[in-house]
Amino acid sequence: MKKEFLVSTIVFLWVALPGWVHADKKEISKCHDHINPLHLKRERVAELDGIWGLFEKNRELQDHSVNAILLDRKVNSIIFHLEYLCDTLYGIPMNEVARYVRDGIKKRGEEGFRKHLIILGKSEAEIDIWYEFLKFSLANKERTLEISSIKESIKKSASHIETYKSLAEQINNQKIDDSIPNKVKALAGEIDGLFKNDKYLSQALAENANIPYVDINESTGGS
């Protein structure tokens, strides 16, 4: 009975819920406009080969290159998750995995599609992850965010990316001293704190953790 209810619910939601196409793209575009200054600062560092590249080019910093590449990744993560917040202002669009599982269940039923996936080489654990992700997708397809809160997250992020750019320019100008590695490590820690304490960035991180990034065709033997 539970399985039949799940299938019925999935089919109903698929038909009844309005698509993401109704989102206000103009507002989403405006949201991205607020991120553009952060992009420019990150691109300035990229022109200098990133913090990692700068560390590699300076012998006195090379032993700390691991922390440098971690900082580059954390800054990229800030930009990625801020863009995600803007893109999902009016809901999380269903990705390829969610659509594939939705359509498969609609066609074969929950158990029938499960058996089909097993034949195609998917494990029970993987299938469980896909089914849970479908439920997550349906539940969040129309969840909304407050643009004012996203702007606040962008504002909090800006100071960290400004520090990132300043560090890169300091190294590039050969103003290097023993404090540089510690500053890089400290900034990485501050970014970790930002993701932990900022409500929306924390939410973006958690939501993205639900998304199974897989190649449908490769995973299912398609072409």
Image (cartoon, rainbow, N blue to C red):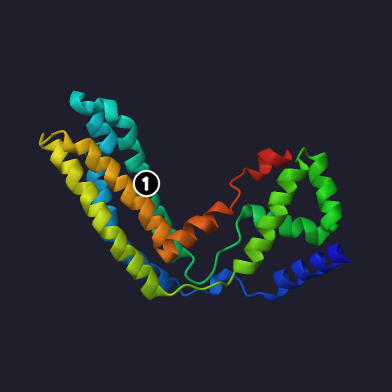
Could you tell me residue 169's position as x and y percent?
A: 15, 42
> Who is closer to the viewer here, 60 or 32?
60
Is the residue 219 above or below the residue 41 in the image?
above
Q: Quadrant of residue 106?
A: bottom right
Q: Quadrant of residue 216?
A: top right
User: Which residue occupies 71% across, 71% down?
Assistant: 13
Quadrant containing the N terminus is bottom right
User: Which residue occupies 51% across, 73% down?
Assistant: 144
Is the residue 125 above or below the residue 64 in the image?
below
User: Which residue occupies 22% across, 29% down?
Assistant: 61
Secondary structure beneath dot 1 equals helix
Residue 40 showing in the rendered view: no
Residue 107 showing in the rendered view: yes
Task: Please tell me how crowded label 1 is: few (under 14), some (14-19), or many (20+) other residues with Cα within 10 Å.
Answer: some
Q: From the viewer's perspective, is 122 left or right of 218?
A: right
Is the residue 66 above or below the residue 110 in the image?
above
User: Which residue occupies 33% across, 42% down?
Assistant: 72
Could you tell me residue 192's position as x and y percent?
A: 38, 51
Could you tell me residue 92's position as x and y percent?
A: 55, 64
Q: From the viewer's perspective, is 94 left or right of 25?
A: right
Q: Quadrant of residue 180?
A: top left
Q: Amino acid at mark 1?
A: Lys
Give the residue furthest to the right: 1
Quadrant containing the C terminus is top right
Q: From the viewer's perspective, is 151 left or right of 19?
A: left
Q: Which residue has dot 1 on it?
A: 74
Is the residue 185 above or below the residue 39 in the image?
above
Could you tell me residue 22's position as x and y percent?
A: 54, 75
